[in-house]
Amino acid sequence: MENSITNMPDKNLLELRNVCVSYTQGKNAVNNVTANFPLHSITAIMGPSGCGKSTLLRAINRMHDLYPNIVTTGEILLKGENVLKMNPMEVRRMAGMVFQRPNPFPTMSIYDNVLAGYKLNGIRLKKREKDEIVETSLRNVTLWDEVKDNMTKKGSFLSGGQQQRLCIARALALKPELLLMDEPTSALDPISTNRIEELLLDLKEKYTIIIVTHNMSQAARISDFSMFMYLGDLVEHGITRQMFTKPKDSRTEEYLTGVFG
């Protein structure tokens, strides 16, 4: 069955068309998902564990390419171009990824962590360019004033919340248009979580954001649109406010009211 949504804005940065992902032949972990992601919006992907949320997110920036047994089919259109036919490095520059646990590179300084994407992609920069990218990226995540006097220290020197903001700065340094976030606050305390949420609301002015979250309150607070996935299917996708007040599918309602999760 094709899962889709109508009445969405015309300007979409990302469009998924009949996307399937399978780990084993004949069984889909993500089943025939069709969805649009409007420019400068936050979309929350919700659902119980094992429903395909992270699998779908990782398909968007070709992370499954690292595992030859994982097969992705359909179309993932980023600015109208199918990422499944693009150079994976180019895709990952356009679609930055932030993971569940803060993962700054432990042997690198704060400064070098921000620039890690350039090094991994073999992109050479002048010192002035590096300095500018580092400062801009750290300012974008409101971290510059906290670390500007400690740039040579390791990323592990920072608190958990600061480390996650550093990882977001590292993703933003490559100037992506899409920011993919896999439960970015689940390992953080409430104060750090609140700072990240406020940051995301600011960042959507420049970026399109997709966030996988188990936290329904978080989805309600920060997302413009929500997707509810269950057993690999996209059950419902729409404006967050409407989905939370008047879900169209009984499974969505049961999830949102805590019948299962």
Image: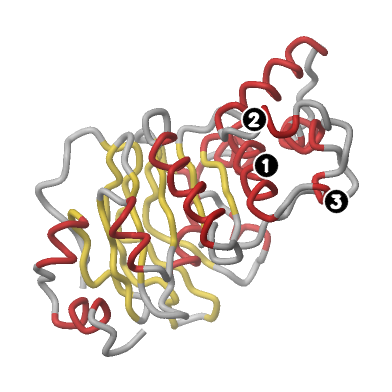
- Residue 71 position (above or below residue 24): above
Q: Nearer the viewer, residue 240 or 149?
A: 149
In the picture, the quarter occupied by the N terminus is bottom left
Residue 58 appearing in the image:
no
Q: Amino acid at mark 1?
A: Leu
Residue 38 appearing in the image:
yes
The residue that label 2 is drawn on is 138
- The residue depicted at 34 percent of the width and 35 percent of the height is 80
Tell whether label 1 touches label 2 (CB within 8 Å): yes
Instruction: Tell me: 218 left or right of 259.
Output: right
- The residue depicted at 31 percent of the width and 41 percent of the height is 41
Q: Amino acid at mark 2?
A: Leu
Q: Position of residue 37 (x, y in %)?
A: 30, 45
- The residue depicted at 34 percent of the width and 36 percent of the height is 13
- The residue depicted at 43 percent of the width and 55 percent of the height is 211
The color scheme shown is secondary structure
Cα–Cα gap, marks 2 and 3 = 18 Å
Judged from this view, the residue extending furthest toward the bottom is 259
Judged from this view, the residue extending furthest toward the front is 191
Q: Amino acid at mark 3?
A: Pro
Cα–Cα gap, marks 1 and 3 = 12 Å
Q: Quadrant of residue 3?
A: bottom left
Element under label 1?
Answer: helix
The residue that label 1 is drawn on is 166
Q: Counting residues from the N terminus, which is met first, the one under dot 1 or under dot 3?
A: 3
The residue that label 3 is drawn on is 106
